[in-house]
Amino acid sequence: MNFLEEKILRDGVIKEGNILKVDSFLNHQIDIDIMRQMAYEFKRRFHGVEVNKVLTIEASGIAIATLLGHLYDVPVVFAKKSETANCTDDKYISQAYSFTHKKMNNVFISKPYLSATDKILIVDDFLADGQAAHSLIDLVRQAGGEVAGIGIAIEKGQQQGGSRLRAEGYRVESLAIIESMDWQTQTVRFRNQPEMSLEGANLTIG
Ligand code: 5GP
């Protein structure tokens, strides 16, 4: 089991409706040591991939992206969300349905912060249906840049975002992939990953 899976088991809470709460280290309070370990692990997994910018979406991706940008020594850009984003010449705009807030968001980046020469590593806290990731890919494409890879802290493997992105040819590296979780028993099952030792076991949170 890797450090993030251990942290999820120790501090995560499963809520009804297929939601994993990780407020104590990722979505509200930020555990800098875990962020640092995540950044090192992404850097290790994307070894040899050329990256000149790290891109995420507000808010929870920003902490991971910042530490990763520090390791690569490249700028970090975060897409902003807004219910209303006027179509102006100075922004790239896309849309994403929010899984947690159950509403459509406009997602935008000011044009000077993306360019056609960019080789972008996208990072985010969660991957569920892939809405957020697809909106970021769309923004990179609008600027004519290249997506070098996608790094995700927690992928919810029961939802189709990860498999769709991989089928589209993107390299997706997720540090913890949840195969299934049960809020009543607070058990979670992680997908087998090479560096894990307790693969496929049902593990209890708390
Ligand atoms: P997607 O766009 O892939 O459908 O969903 C990813 C986004 O939804 C993430 O940026 C994250 O903010 C949120 N999200 C989706 N599922 C969960 C979850 O189980 N727990 C938390 N904390 N956030 C989630």
Image: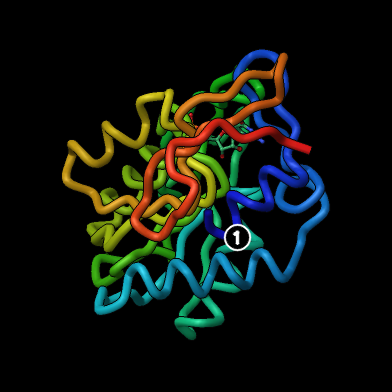
Neighbourhood count class around disc 1 (C-alpha, 10 Å): few under 14, some 14–19, many 20 upward: some
Q: Which residue is mark 1?
A: 3
Mark yes or no: residue 20 visible: yes
Is the residue 201 above or below the residue 175 in the image? above
Residue 105, quarter of the rendered image: top right
Provide residue 52's location: percent of width, then percent of height. 36, 76
Q: Is residue 206 rendered to the left or right of residue 156?
A: right
Mark yes or no: residue 109 visible: no
> Where the C terminus falls, by quadrant?
top right
Point out the residue furthest to the bottom here. Answer: 73
At 60% from the left edge and 40% from the top edge, which residue is drawn? 81
Provide residue 83's location: percent of width, then percent of height. 62, 28
Q: Under tag 1, what secondary structure? A: helix
Label tally: 1
Provide residue 88's location: percent of width, then percent of height. 46, 43
Residue type, label 1: Phe
Q: Nearer the viewer, residue 190 or 150?
A: 190
Image-quarter location of ligand 1: top right
At 59% from the left edge and 31% from the top edge, which residue is drawn? 188
At 53% from the left edge and 54% from the top edge, which residue is drawn? 1
Is the residue 188 above or below the residue 126 in the image? above
